[in-house]
Each structure stands twice: as structure tokens, then as C-alpha cells.
Image (spheres, rainbow, N blue to C red):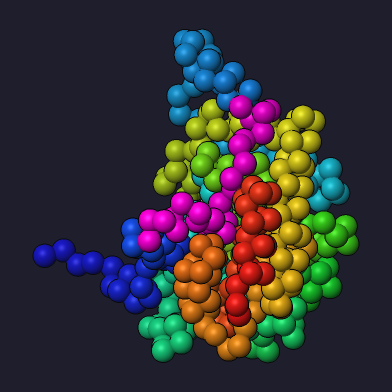
Amino acid sequence: MALLNENYLKLKAGYLFPEIARRVKTFCAEKPEAAGRLIRCGIGDVTEPLPAAVIQAMHKAVDEMGVRNTFKGYGPEQGYDWLRQVIAQNDYRQRGLDVADDEIFVSDGSKCDCGAILDILGDRNKIAISDPVYPVYVDTNVMAGHTGVANEDGRYGRLVYLPCRPANGFVPEPPSKPVDVVYLCSPNNPTGAVATRAQLEAWVQYALKHQAIILFDAAYEAYIQDPALPHSIYEIPGARECAIEFRSFSKNGGFTGLRCAFTVVPKSLMARTRGGESQPLHPLWNRRSATKFNGVSYVVQRAAEALYTEEGKRQVSDLVKHYMGNAVVLRQGAKKAGLKAYGGENAPYIWVRTPKGMTSWQVFDKILGEANVVITPGSGFGSKGEGFFRISAFNSRENAEEVARRLKELAW
Ligand code: MLT
């Protein structure tokens, strides 16, 4: 009989969002009268239609695919040159950041790339993650065999956990001991906190000192409102020598159903062999893409390109304004309900303290059962997420206002 990957057996229960979906489905089956008024503020999935510029670009691209001399078969695995160029130019060079076109790797999602990046890293690295954290960073390391088993708190052996609490503004500090790889997510999922320039400088200094690699997830950078906050790790001198950046079109362009993202691997980023020889990671990621990936479809890459037109930029900005308007409504709603709320100012997530020592799943059940609203329990993001819950601002304004009203009406 074939052997299975036993690392999967170390994973805790289901992945958070399918588990929430399962519970919500059961609730709706048992209480059909409540199901009709259900509002979902759980998973951070966009609700508003795609920008008009994207739709127009896709129609054109579809028509091209229907004509022999404009039809496209396999594209470059790393993405079409015209898209890599427009990304590097708009997101980096126009902001004074040194990123070359061929350091951009277009993909079908940041979640996928955050997991796939482990292919090119060794299996003996000491890995640091924030707690609470986007579960993908942890689970992909478990699957790859980079961890021990989980303890009662759900913490895995061999991972270094960096607690994120109100006292540090939910931004992790570099640990006192060296690690080899660290995941940073800013604006943060789930807490909505954003690392300041000084905080990222401390991380880059730490990474350079210990020859560590920062895996910087900036999927929510479009939500930053405060001009003083950095959008990219490459705004920090030295980051090209120690950081890989993940970006996504899911949350700015509303591409969660369309699928397109990109990862930046600078050519100056090195890692070492077990023998101690320093080697660039860029050719490894390039090789990985060529072997394991066939690229994002032509139509979707044309859609992503359209986000960078003047019209596309305006439409993205309107989408972000819409969701951030919801974030204000929800944050204020939580406060008016007497709850302590964090985040939601430079991120589409509001991170709320559970009242009266309730666990986060107790709050989940209460809000689902009594207000018919789905939130995400903080413990699903790690043991330090216990005592908190997350409200997603991805919704219609009407629903955000209704959620704020229902939260206030709940007897806490
Ligand atoms: C979330 O709700 O945390 C997001 O949907 C995660 C993701 O984008 O994969």
C-alpha cells in the first residue's frame, strides 16, 4: 500500500474557513427562518462587482481568443512581459523602488504562492510566525514537515511564535534568538494592524544580521490610508537582500473569483546550501514556476493589466473607499455595542475583544444564533487570537450598517 504524507495528520481539524462554512450550513439547516437574514462577515471575500475597466479588457481578450491570429496558447509561466512591466512600473518604480520586470512572477494567488515558496527553501529552517496569524503560513509548513506536532494550544513544535497583542499594537517584534525565515503580513490579516516604517526597519536589520528571509505578505496594501505607513517591504533599505513580497489583485481589484496575484523575488536575495555556499533564490523560483505552473490565463492577465489604466486605478480606489467606509461603520458599531475594537483604519478587518471572558467560538455562536451574523473566531488564527474575533468589512454598505445595528442590539 502506498504511503501517505503523515505531516497532514498533524494538522488541526479543518481549515478555518471551511469549518466556519460547515457550522453556518448546519445553523441554516436547523433554523431556516434565521438563514434568510444571515449576513456574512466571516471570510474576507469581496462582494462588489469587478471594475468596469476589467470587464471591458476581458471582453476584448475573449474576442482575441476566438480569432486564429490573436489566439493565445500557453503563455510564459512567469506572466506576460506586458503585465510584469506594468506591475513593476506602477507598484514599485513609480514609487522610487528598485524592482525589475523579471523580478515579478504573476500567479493565481498569494495564498498559493505563500505555500509554494516553501518548495525553494530548505527543510531545516527555523521559522517564525505571528500569533494570531493567517493560518496558511502555519499549515503549509506543517504539510511540508517543517514542524513538530501541535500541543494543547494548537502550537506546533519547531515553530517560533511571535505574540501579537494590544501591548505591541499587534505588530510582532524580532525575537531575541535567530530564526531563518519569518512571515510578516502588513496590513495584517486578521488584526488589521499595519507595521510602521521603524518596525519594518527593525525587521530588515534583524534579517540582514541573521541572514534570514522575510516573507512579506502585502495582499492588503491598497487599504493603507495613512501616508506615513509603508506599502512595500522594499521601501526599507536592505530589503532586496532579505525579503520576498507577495501581492494580490484579490482585495484591491476584487479578483477573489478571477484569480491573479504576483510575487516579487529580487535577484539580489540569497540563501545558502547546507555546504555553506550562497546562491540566489530567483533562478530557483523561476525554475519552480516553469516546472510546476502553466501561468495565469491570458484573459485574466489582461484583466489585471486593466487595473493599472487611469480608469482602472480610479475604479480600484472607489472599491477600496467603499470597503473602508464599511470598516468605519463596523468599527464604530462594535464600539457602540460596548466592545473594544482594533484595526479597520488601514485594513478591511476589525479585530474585536470578546466581552466578559467569552471564548471566541462562544462569541461566534452568540452572534450567529442571536444576530444571524457570521464573524471569524480569533482562536482560528492561533492561541493568541483567543479572546478576539474578526469582522470583515467586505460587504455592501447596507449590510455593514445592519451588522453594526444588530451588534448594538445584542445583550452582551
Ligand atoms: C480571510 O478571510 O482571511 C481571507 O479570505 C484569506 C484569504 O484571502 O485567503
Magenta residue check for 42: yes
Question: Residue 390 placed where, x, y %?
Answer: 60, 68
Magenta residue check for 208: no
Q: In this view, does 234 lie above or below 90?
A: below
Question: Residue 59 placed where, x, y %?
Answer: 57, 20
User: Residue 73's image quarter?
Assistant: top left
Q: Is residue 393 above or below residue 381?
A: above
Q: Tell me which secondary structure the magenta stretch mostly adopts.
A: loop
Per the rendered image, the range of residues in magenta is 31-55
- Nearest the eye: 146 or 311: 311
* Image quadrant containing the N terminus: bottom left
Q: In this view, does 371 lie above or below 221?
A: below
- Nearest the eye: 361 or 237: 361
Which residue sits at x=81%, y=60%? 230
Q: Is residue 288 left or right of residue 207?
A: left
Question: Residue 183 placed where, x, y %?
Answer: 61, 69
Q: In this view, does 114 lie to the left or right of 186?
A: left
User: Residue 301's image quarter?
Assistant: top right
Which residue sits at x=80%, y=30%? 310
- Nearest the eye: 295 or 401: 401
As drawn, which residue projects farthest toward the left? 1
Question: Residue 247 placed where, x, y %?
Answer: 64, 51
